[in-house]
């Protein structure tokens, strides 16, 4: 894969670039074959003056920095991380820096709810607390065979939103906060034309992003529950190609960039 040849200060702002990819990581940007990922990543790096990159992911900032520094992932311009509870700019050294003005409402809605959530769900069947002390969310690994749906009602009773995805994750989020609303907040802040953004995902925690109003793709191999929930959303391209190849398929199919390589 090629290395990024231009620093952030040398690149046009995202609002001035004709296309921006806003993509989930696991199963989407990181999905597919090595060859498909290489084709997408090299294409992005070769077209950075005209292509913006936003990671919209459940992953935390340290994970993103590590993937860019150690695993050759293209450096995103911005991140909507932690399932939408982090909105941040990415520096040249791949460190992630939250944008306080965009996170202020998220922080206010959440308050200091983490400890109360952990107490309320302590011992809940099928939930295993993830060890990371996220700022504005609490997350669990979920065993679908022993999970009790009453946990979701407990979360709603506390004033928060439960999110189940891929039959393996259970997230507790501030009410009304998820990938879609946070992505739109960032897009508006940056002055990006919504019609020139492609949102890409593959599981239910991408649903709010894929239906938020921008062009979107559910890549091949997406979670069945997500595909069912997207019925009637005709603006969402349901790709046949898996992961990174599905992103390239959608860019070409939706005519979002004049220089898209064939899948």
Image: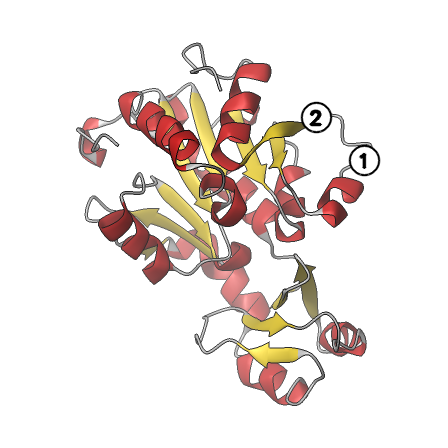
Q: Nearer the viewer, residue 13 or 208?
A: 208
How far apart marks 2 and 1 lie (CA) works out to 10 Å
> Can residue 254 be seen?
no
Horizontal arrangement in the rendering, residue 108 relative to residue 20 (left or right): right
Counting from the top left corner in percent of width and height, residue 46 is at 28, 22
Horizontal arrangement in the rendering, residue 60 relative to residue 108 (left or right): left
Counting from the top left corner in percent of width and height, residue 207 is at 67, 46
Neighbourhood count class around disc 2 (C-alpha, 10 Å): few under 14, some 14–19, many 20 upward:
some
Q: Residue at x 49, y 38 (%)?
A: 32
Q: Residue at x 56, y 36 (%)?
A: 200
Color encoding of the figure: secondary structure
Neighbourhood count class around disc 1 (C-alpha, 10 Å): few under 14, some 14–19, many 20 upward:
few
Quarter of the figure with residue 52: top left
Q: Which mark is residue 235?
A: 2
Q: Quadrant of the N terminus?
A: top left
Q: Nearer the viewer, residue 172 or 67?
A: 67
Horizontal arrangement in the rendering, residue 230 relative to residue 50 (left or right): right
Which element is circle 2 on? loop
Residue at the spot of label 1: 231
Counting from the top left corner in percent of width and height, residue 175 is at 66, 63
> Can residue 202 be seen?
yes
């Amino acid at each position: 894969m090629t290395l990024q040849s231009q620093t952030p200060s040398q690149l046009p702002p995202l609002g001035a670039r004709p296309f921006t990819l806003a993509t989930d990581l696991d199963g989407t940007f990181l999905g597919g074959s090595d060859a498909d990922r290489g084709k997408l990543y090299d294409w992005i790096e070769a077209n950075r003056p005209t292509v913006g990159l936003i990671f919209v992911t459940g992953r935390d900032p340290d994970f993103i920095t590590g993937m860019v520094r150690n695993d050759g992932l293209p450096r995103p311009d911005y991140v909507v991380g932690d399932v939408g509870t982090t909105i941040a700019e990415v520096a040249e050294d791949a460190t992630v820096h939250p944008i306080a003005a965009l996170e202020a409402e998220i922080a206010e809605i959440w308050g200091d709810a983490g400890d109360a959530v952990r107490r309320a769900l302590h011992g809940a069947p099928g939930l295993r607390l993830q060890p990371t002390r996220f700022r504005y969310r609490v997350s669990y690994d979920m065993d679908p065979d022993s999970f009790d749906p009453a946990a979701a009602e407990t979360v709603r009773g506390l004033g928060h939103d439960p999110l189940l995805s891929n039959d393996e994750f259970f997230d507790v989020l501030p009410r009304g906060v998820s990938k879609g609303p946070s992505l739109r907040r960032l897009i508006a802040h940056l002055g990006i034309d919504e019609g020139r953004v492609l949102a890409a995902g593959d599981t239910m925690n991408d649903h709010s992003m894929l239906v938020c109003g921008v062009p979107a793709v559910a890549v091949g191999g997406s979670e069945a529950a997500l595909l069912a929930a997207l019925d009637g959303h005709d603006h969402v391209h349901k790709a046949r190609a898996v992961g990174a190849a599905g992103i390239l398929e959608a860019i070409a199919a939706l005519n979002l960039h004049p220089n898209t390589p064939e899948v």
